[in-house]
Image (tube, helix red, strand yellow):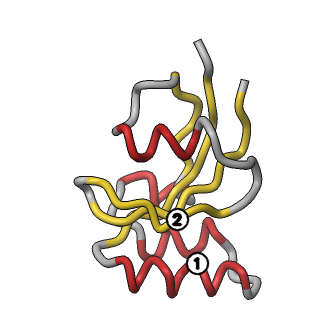
């Protein structure tokens, strides 16, 4: 079964997710922004979700993690929890 590691930032609005994505593209540190703004408990560890199997996350999140390019920030991705910025760090 495919596995991946990823980190994310979860926020309430698409506009705020886009603002954070722009800050990252302008050189801001992903982990620092996750610690400051993410509504997910993983924010305390820079948004790191560790390794997980395909199918473990909600479908919208899973689709990005297992199909998009590694090492880039993707999103905002809307799920039932809010809007995610996702960085895939590895996939096997």
In percent of the image, x 65 and y 63: which residue is there? Answer: 73
Q: Is residue 44 left or right of residue 29?
A: left
56 or 69, nearer to the observer = 69
Q: What element carries label 1?
A: helix
Task: Give the percent coordinates (x, y) of residue 12.
Answer: 28, 73
Label 2, residues with CA under 10 Å away: few <14, some 14-19, many ≥20: some
Q: In this view, does 11 lie to the left or right of 73?
A: left
**Residue under pointer 2:** 75
**Residue under pointer 1:** 21
Distance from disc 2 to disc 1, alpha carbons, whole Å, reads: 8 Å
Q: Is residue 10 above or below residue 29?
A: above
Q: What element carries label 2?
A: strand
Q: Earlier in the sequence, mark 2 or mark 1?
A: 1
Task: Give the percent coordinates (x, y) of residue 40.
Answer: 35, 57
List the single residue furthest toward the left.
80
In percent of the image, x 73 and y 37: which residue is there? Answer: 90
Label 1 near label 2: C-beta < 8 Å? yes
Task: Give the percent coordinates (x, y) of residue 8.
Answer: 52, 57
Nearest-to-viewer mark from 2 and 1: 2
What quarter of the picture does the C terminus occupy?
top right
Task: Give the percent coordinates (x, y) of residue 1.
Answer: 58, 12
Q: In this view, does 66 lie to the left or right of 71?
A: left
Q: How many marks?
A: 2
Dividing the picture into quarters, in which one does residue 77 lie?
bottom left
In percent of the image, x 47 and y 68: which residue is there? Answer: 76
């Amino acid at each position: 079964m495919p596995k991946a590691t990823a980190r994310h930032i979860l926020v309430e609005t698409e506009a705020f997710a886009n603002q954070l994505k722009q800050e990252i593209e302008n050189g801001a540190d992903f982990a620092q922004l996750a610690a400051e703004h993410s509504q997910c408990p993983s924010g305390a560890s820079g948004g790191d979700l560790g390794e997980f199997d395909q199918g473990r996350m909600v479908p919208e999140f899973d689709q990005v993690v297992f199909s998009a390019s590694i090492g880039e920030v993707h999103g905002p991705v809307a799920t039932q929890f809010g809007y995610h910025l996702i960085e895939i760090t590895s996939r096997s």
